[in-house]
Image: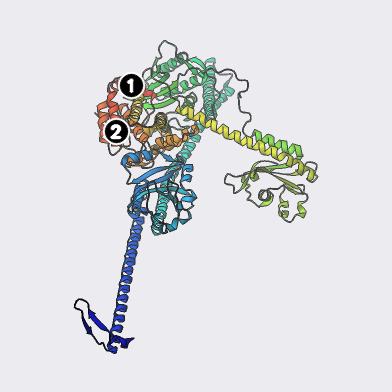
Amino acid sequence: MLMSLTHQTLQAPFTGVVAAVTIPGPMVVVLVAVTGIGVWAAMMWLRIKAGRRRLEVRADILRQRNRKLENILAVAARINATMNLSELGAKVAAAVEEVTGFRRVILYLWSDTTKAFEARSFAGVAPAEQARLSSRQILASEYDELIREEGRYSNCYLLDPAGQSPGDAGLCLDLLPDSRKWKAGHRLVAPLASSTGDVIGFLDLDDPASGLVPDPAAIRQLEFLIRQASTAIESAEVYDHLASKNAELSAASEKLNSLADMKKNFVANVSHELRTPLTSISAYTELLQRNLDTLSSESLDEFLDVIHDESVKLTGIINDILDLSQMENGRPSMKQVDTDLVAIVGHLREAWESRARRMNIRFALDAGDENINLPLDPLLIQQMLTHLVGNAFKFTPEGGEVKVGVHETGTAVCLTVQDTGIGIPDDKLGDIFESFYQVDSSATRRHNGQGVGLAICRDIVVHHDGRIWAENVEPSGTRITVLLPRRPAVVQPADPMSLTGLPFEAGEFVQRLMHWISESLGIQVATLMVPQPGGEHLTIRAAIGLPESVVQSARVRKGSGFAGHVWESGETLLIGDLTRDSRFRRELNEPRYSTPSLLCVPLMDGEDLVGIISVNNKVDGTALDQDDKVFLESLAPRLTSLLTRYENWQDGARDFEAIRDTLRSTTALGHMRHESLLEVCQEICLASARRIMLPGDELEHLAFSLQFYDVGLDTVPARVLAKPGRLDAEERRHVEKHVDAGLGILESLELNAKVKQLILHHHENYDGTGYPVGLAGEAIPLGSRLIRLADTLSSLLSPRPWRPAMGLGDAVDVIRRGIGREYCPRMTEVFLAETEIRRERILDLQTRQDAAANLNRLALDQAAPVPVLT
């Protein structure tokens, strides 16, 4: 073949000339070899270049991943260094946006208060939408719908409204045509789990910058960041919880020390108060015994008068202590009838005037001539008046004055007792109504007493659903005010089926149940054991024939002892002769086994253990047998039913007791004959909500919340509410707890999550410095922002113990200065526009608000101390 090439003829077609070229064979070989080597070299160079390019690309990818991991670690470090939960939420949302490239990030956190997930932080969400999302809760059932298994993508969930979900192919999306394109409606839900596996929140992600569904590597990076965020959030919550518990522990310790001091002082004071009249009685009685025949009639009358007076004083001390004990143990026996309060005061007037003359003190009574009838217990009200006026006389010096006043205030009756005595330190005004409390508890104090009189007055007022408070007056002295509701009678038809009292006294039901069992079986020892709430131990609920020390201390684990064995097996245990049963022989040394037989029967409600009945020691000395077993097993279902119904009844009774207390706490204490400033501020709030087109259901929630958002203020000490100037850390903690306290008071009304959210966050500041959570900006629900404005305006326009009422112009200026810090700019403008519409009504009401001030709960404007305008 090669040789034939040397004789090939080349013809130039364009000239028609034929030329012949002869190529030697070796040259052909060389040319072919060189050509092959060149081709091979070129191919190798291209392959090396492609490989280098791939290596460079991979190196770039690794460098990018390394930088991203370094970024994630740096972000995680910043997150973990943050202990403020509100600030932490904002950092988490920003970090997810930065690291993952999602341009829309919403962080939802679980709220134990509202029992729902709440949107707390945002990235890439418009303010208007933030407001909408903040006002909506995600219930646990709704969250479960988001994380259905068919949408699972690693440990996250990819949602597609079109019904397409990655399913089992979630980690192989890059192999499917167009499957990695991010479509409209896609959402990526990333749960945040605690160390125990509980979901504490989740991230709602949308709009990736790449336009693609994240690949598995990006998902793993996201999940690493989420784990760091979950740890940080859990740590912040634990930190807040520990700080709160430490503060509570400190307060409890101080309270215990205070109670210990009060107990010590009470014992000393009562000992002194009892010893003094007893000493007088004993001394004068001894003088009478020795000198009865020689005493003149005048001396005899004097001695008997002293003995009588001291006996009355002694009886009064004992009665006060017994009355206080009865009232603190529950509602006293009250017989409310329609009574003229002016007549009661008039009946006591002569005694007060007589005492005033003896003490050289001026006395004045201002009760008017018209009757003031209201439902009350005349004896209790008379007792209260005796204590209040007696206190006023006791602390008023000679030449001073005591004044008693009774008048109507709207649909309530106001009773005042004022003196010109020594007054009460401002920081003690809220403590004087505590049992056994005395401003001067020293042994050298000038005024006697046990510290129970004002506590009795407080309880009498509370049981009449009223209010009582003390305040100092100028130039000296104290005024105590009692406000009693004057409500219309409620007429109800007679109901023969209604209960007039409790069906059982405390412990009576279980006592009768145990006697029924013991007498039916003829046994001497019977024990009812029930599982503890945690389910770790059985404890003795009731027993016959056991020492109290055993009943109080017994704890039985599952599988331990007779009852533990029955608990574990769920079957009856009958032991005819304990001496022959090796499992329980060690128990025979206990003295309660006078006969060597035992019967234990489980009380089961389905698969749940309600209790275990254990019996032994038959009265006739015989062993328990199969007949006893069959009989007690026949009782078991009935005992289970009775115990379950009893527990349900107790739970219901506790629920209705809580409802009663809630209704008492939230029922308004009278109304003025005209509208109040508070009502106008609430009207402004609702009008603002309508102006921003708040949906109807949310408007209803806002209307309810407006009436009861600050009911928890009643739990804040009065001295804190009335304190001028800034609050210290302990006082601040008292104030901040009133939000949770209020929700606790309202809990029996079964509030929905939305109402709880509005009440919970109504003291949040727009800049994130508020409480209790520290939400900021649009994360604060719209309704809460409006309530905050209404609360502030009402407070500023009303007088407070530390400042007079502000004019409307000054109040508006204060609110405007707080825009962006305390108040939402957008909501404030709407709110103030509605306020301006009602300017004339507000100005008119301010001129006649003095009488209404007593009907309003004390409110706070201490969050950013409001200046006192002079």
Residue under numbered circle 1: 849
Q: Nearer the viewer, residue 351 or 241?
A: 241
- Determine the image quadrant of residue 330: top right
Q: Which quadrant of the rendered structure holds the C terminus?
A: top left
Q: Is residue 842 above or below residue 55?
A: above
Mark identifier at residue 828: 2
Determine crowd level at label 1: few under 14, some 14-19, many 20+ residues with C-alpha closer than 10 A: some
Q: Is residue 329 left or right of residue 163?
A: right
Q: Is residue 564 above or below residue 658?
A: below
The mark closer to the camera, 2 or 1, is 2
Residue at the spot 49% in from the left edge and 50% down from the top edge:
149
Note whether residue 801 is visible: no
Residue type for callout 1: Gln
Q: Nearer the viewer, residue 272 or 823?
A: 823
The percent position of residue 652, horizontal first and vertical second, equals: 57, 33
Residue type for callout 2: Thr
